[in-house]
Amino acid sequence: MILPDKTTLIEDAIAGIRDGATVMLGGFGVPGTPFTLIRELVRQGQRDLTIIKNDANEAGMGVDHLLANGQVARLITTHIGLNPRAVAMLNSGEIDVEFCAQGILAERVRAGGAGLKAILTDIAMQTELGAGKPRIEVNGAEAMVETALRADVALLHADQADVFGNLDYAATARNFNPLMAMAADHVIAEAEAVLPLGDLPPDEVHTPGPFVDQVVRLDALSEEYGVVRR
Amino acid sequence: MISRAAREIAPGMVVNLGIGLPTKVVDHLAPDFPVCLHTENGLTGIGPTLPVEDADRNLIDAGGAYVSTIPGSAFFDSATSFSLVRSGRLDLTMLGAFEVAQNGDLANWKIPGKFSPGAGGGVELAQKAQRVVVLSTHTDRSGKPKLLADCTLPLTAKGCVDRIFTDMAVVDVTPQGFALREIAEGVSVDQVIAATDAELSLPDGEISVF
């Protein structure tokens, strides 16, 4: 037996995203953000997207290009304070923003990936982040329903992949990537190195290949991946 | 104030230092002090902050500073990171504040109409850390007290704050409200009272100075 090769040209991978799609983006700040896949999504110009990402990156990086190009209708996120355009578009009503506590965003994505419909939590139950969400009693205590999140497409950034789509993330670039890998109907991973089968030791695989549909090899890293000089 | 706050960290603790003033606390810990620092973007065992020329582009803390690992560090995903927070493994968090109420309510994520960047991981840190201490100036830039009878801004978490370190004082949140524990050198008790917009109980006898 041999595991199938999922390496794909970036143009073909991103062309599968439709207008109106819900798209998960890995990353926390720079590390783990699939900047090259996002650039291609900007080039192709799919519109009316719902973006699910921890943050909105910074000016001139990642999500900021999608916002500047008018491709985003809705953002489900935890913190956009480092992106003035995102804050301005929220304030002007140009985009709809749903804020979520960070670990609850992670659990909603994980639940979506695990085939669950929702999670029950007490986080943010007594704040405006919890306003309007259903409450139920669990073992005598009140809990709040947070619905699971799934997406049409997840775009991930891996340090290393093999051609089957086993993924390995570097340092704090792991963040939301392995959770989103499980929570979308179609998963596209860009990788800094794409290895032959067998070169990624099974014990070092963070995301198993069956979760990944397409692997895009990064020939070069743009400036966006670099160290930010603030 | 920062060096005084650093003494709040006991040997063996798992600690998350929030963005802003709290991150400076680490500069006051001895290199051989046994403590595990956590950052919610997926690292325990945070090592020294690095200048950009030495930075690893994939190794940041939640505030975006370039940090390093130390022997024993671990990386993990965001769900694991907040499992650590919500399950009670985080002994202490130090957070910034816009407002703290005398019942321990904390507001530090939103000023309606002016500033609404989202709370990031702050809600879970405030609600679930075993001990929550606030590091903040005693008043805001316009001189308005931050320690209040009731918060006016949207809350991060209710009744979560245990202790407040300011440039003027150390104040505990007790079932009876704010209790003044220590004052900064050169500050009088009357000045602290005047800069606090809530009842402040005073210690018996002489107050210690930090």
Image (spheres, coloured by chain):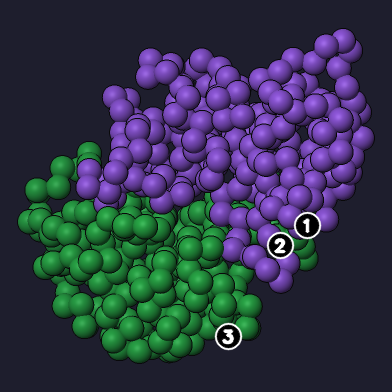
Chain colours: A green, B purple
**Amino acid type of the residue tagged 2 in the rendering:** Ile
Q: Earlier in the sequence, mark 2 or mark 1?
A: 2
The answer to which quarter of the image holds residue B112 is bottom right
For this view, does B66 lie left or right of residue B88? left
Distance between the Cα atoms at labels 2 and 3? Answer: 20 Å
Which residue is at 20% across, 77% downward? A10
Q: Which residue is mark 2?
A: B111
Q: Is residue A157 above or below residue B129?
A: below
Q: In front: mark 2 or mark 3?
A: 2
Position of residue B146 measured from the top left corner of the image (x, y, whole percent): 77, 46
Is the residue marked by circle 2 packed among few (<14), some (14-19), or many (20+) residues within 10 Å? some
Which residue is at 61% across, 29% downward? B1
**Amino acid type of the residue tagged 1 in the rendering:** Leu
- Assign a secondary structure to mark 2: loop
- Assign a secondary structure to mark 3: loop
**Residue A169 in view (yes/no):** no
**Amino acid type of the residue tagged 3 in the rendering:** Glu
Distance between the Cα atoms at labels 3 and 1? Answer: 25 Å
Give the residue furthest to the front.
B186
- Assign a secondary structure to mark 1: loop
Q: In front: mark 3 or mark 1?
A: 1
The answer to which quarter of the image holds residue A140 is top right
Image mark for residue A94: 3
For this view, does A44 lie left or right of residue B159? left
**Pointer 2 with pointer 1, Cβ within 8 A:** yes
Between A120 and B137, the one lying in front of the other is B137
For this view, does B13 lie left or right of residue B203? left
Q: Which residue is mark 1?
A: B153
Q: Is residue B151 above or below residue B187?
A: below
**Pointer 3 with pointer 1, Cβ within 8 A:** no
Which residue is at 37% across, 19% downward? B31
